[in-house]
Image (spheres, rainbow, N blue to C red):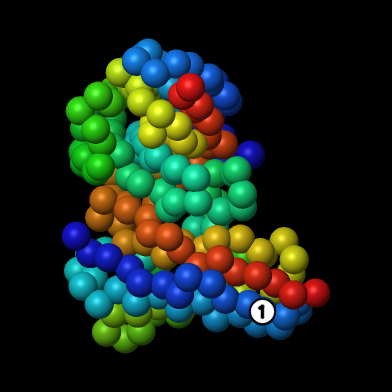
Amino acid sequence: DSGVTQTPKHLITATGQRVTLRCSPRSGDLSVYWYQQSLDQGLQFLIHYYNGEERAKGNILERFSAQQFPDLHSELNLSSLELGDSALYFCASSVAAWGSSPLHFGNGTRLTVT
Amino acid sequence: DAKTTQPNSMESNEEEPVHLPCNHSTISGTDYIHWYRQLPSQGPEYVIHGLTSNVNNRMASLAIAEDRKSSTLILHRATLRDAAVYYCILYQKVTFGIGTKLQVIP
């Protein structure tokens, strides 16, 4: 158990809809990262927050947005969903904002868009 | 962005050592080298990380070239549980590539 909690585990929704994925980091971790993994693809970095502030953006679509709240949990909002958004979405957390500490991943949210 | 290059797949016999290579020729002086592994439908699991010196932990060893342009993850005795996709990343935008799929043969 990594200590990172992601909810829900599974989500099935229709095209055009909007969903919110939630991540609770490990206790004491200030950084939260979001990744997308499509079938048989590598992990695509989406966005990184540190202590409530956005630190880095990767290949995140304009239809997607995220935030980190004062209690350090994070939410990833996906809107105007398309079939191609079907994927596993992982959240990871770490103590620091930079590379000296490991990333700890949750078990992901599997999103299916029909 | 600094990138890494890994072989797509490797095979190893059970109970033999495995050396997984990673090239990162554009690494900068402050980039940490991290290794993770992932089983199907699970989140990646941290394996090891380092900056300049070789590192050992209970899971593996990390050998870093003197010029830091490459590194090698060493699993000292491969078990069936080690069969996974292994990712080598540099800690800039923590971008993962496709990784190396390790197959362990009994």
> On the rendered structure, is A16 left or right of A86?
left
x, y percentage for residue B37? Answer: 54, 58
Number of callouts in the render?
Answer: 1
Q: Residues within 10 Å of mark 1 (few under 14, many from 20)?
A: some
Give the residue displayed 53% in from the left and 19% down from the top: A12
Compared with B88, A68 (above or below) is: above
Give the residue displayed 52% in from the left and 63% down from the top: B86
x, y percentage for residue A108? Answer: 52, 34
What element does badge 1 sit on? strand
The residue identified by callout 1 is B12
In this orientation, does residue B61 appear? no
> In which quadrant of the rendered image does the C terminus of chain B lie?
bottom right
Give the residue displayed 38% in from the left and 59% down from the top: B97
Asked whether A75 or B51 is in front, the reply is A75
> On the rendered structure, is B19 left or right of B82?
left
Question: Which quadrant of the figure has residue A72?
Answer: top left
In this orientation, does residue A74 appear? yes
> In which quadrant of the rendered image does the N terminus of chain B lie?
bottom left
Asked whether B35 or B101 is in front, the reply is B101
Question: Which quadrant of the figure has residue B69?
Answer: bottom left
The type of residue carrying mark 1 is Ser
Give the residue displayed 26% in from the left and 51% down from the top: B93
Compared with A79, A85 (above or below) is: below
Q: Residue furthest top?
A: A17
x, y percentage for residue A106? Answer: 53, 37
Q: Chain of mark 1?
A: B
Compared with A35, B96 (above or below) is: below
> On the rendered structure, is A11 left or right of B17?
left
x, y percentage for residue B98? Answer: 43, 60
